[in-house]
Amino acid sequence: MRTAGPNAEKTIIYCRSINQVAAVYEDLLSRIGEDAWQGKTHTTENLGITMYHGSIGKLQEQYVLNTFVKTDSIERCVVCTIAFGMGIQVTDVRHIINFGPSKSPLHYWQEVGRAGRDGLPSSATLLLGPRSLDKRLVNPEMLKVCARISSEKCCARRAILVAIHMQKMPRVAVRSSVCGNHCSACVCEACCCCSLCRSSCPCRLEATAT
């Protein structure tokens, strides 16, 4: 947002609690500073970052929903709990960031699925730490998914699909800007999958070598 301002790519940051939403929101504001606002006055209407959870009030909920859905919305980043997203159609979200594991593998699949609904390349980032993997607080199946992903030995997409019993779901072939210059097929499933698949993709390795 410091450089792109109102043209920054839309991002949803999912947190596990209202307290975490507030902490992440405050941290972002302090890091971005004046660039978080579009204009000299600090008002809700020209702030590019907002919060959404079950305790913000109905008027604020409706304002966030009605504003974020617009293509030219000043709101470019929503820090929220899982309360945000249900029944909401925002097609141009480019990035999903999960601050810790989701409630379950199915919840995680639904959350990351809110990016790139217009068919354009998008990303999902899962941030994990020792404190976020407390067995008393996290679904056992989600813990298994996190362990497989963090081991860097298993495709993240496959780990999630196995957990929700959808491992036979086909990939959608997407043209990759990386392999487009180095691959005869010009379509590479690996480059458009997870970080592990990208790092081991022959197209990308060939591009790095040259």
Image (tube, rainbow, N blue to C red):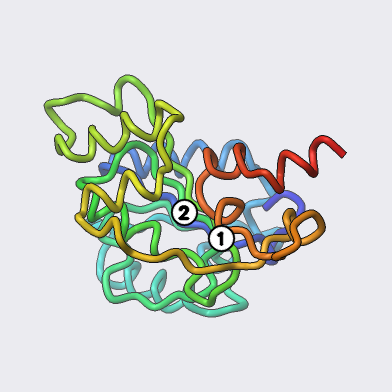
**Which residue, given by chain and number where applicable, does mark 2 sit on?**
96
Q: Which of the two residues, 192 or 32, is positioned nearer the viewer here?
A: 192
The percent position of residue 83, horizontal first and vertical second, equals 25, 60
Residue at 67% across, 44% down? 202
Q: Which of the two residues, 124 or 25, is positioned nearer the viewer here?
A: 124
Q: Nearer the viewer, mark 1 or mark 2?
A: 1
Q: Is residue 108 above or below residue 150?
A: below
Marks 1 & 2, CB-CB < 8 Å contact: yes
Q: Residue furthest top?
A: 130
Residue at 30% across, 39% down? 101
Q: Which of the two residues, 143 or 199, is positioned nearer the viewer here?
A: 199
Q: CA distance from mark 1 to mark 2?
A: 8 Å
**Which residue, given by chain and number where applicable, does mark 1 sit on?**
122
Amino acid type assigned to the residue bearing label 2 in the image: Ile
The percent position of residue 121, horizontal first and vertical second, equals 60, 64
The percent position of residue 85, horizontal first and vertical second, equals 32, 66
Q: Quadrant of the C terminus?
A: top right
Amino acid type assigned to the residue bearing label 1 in the image: Ser
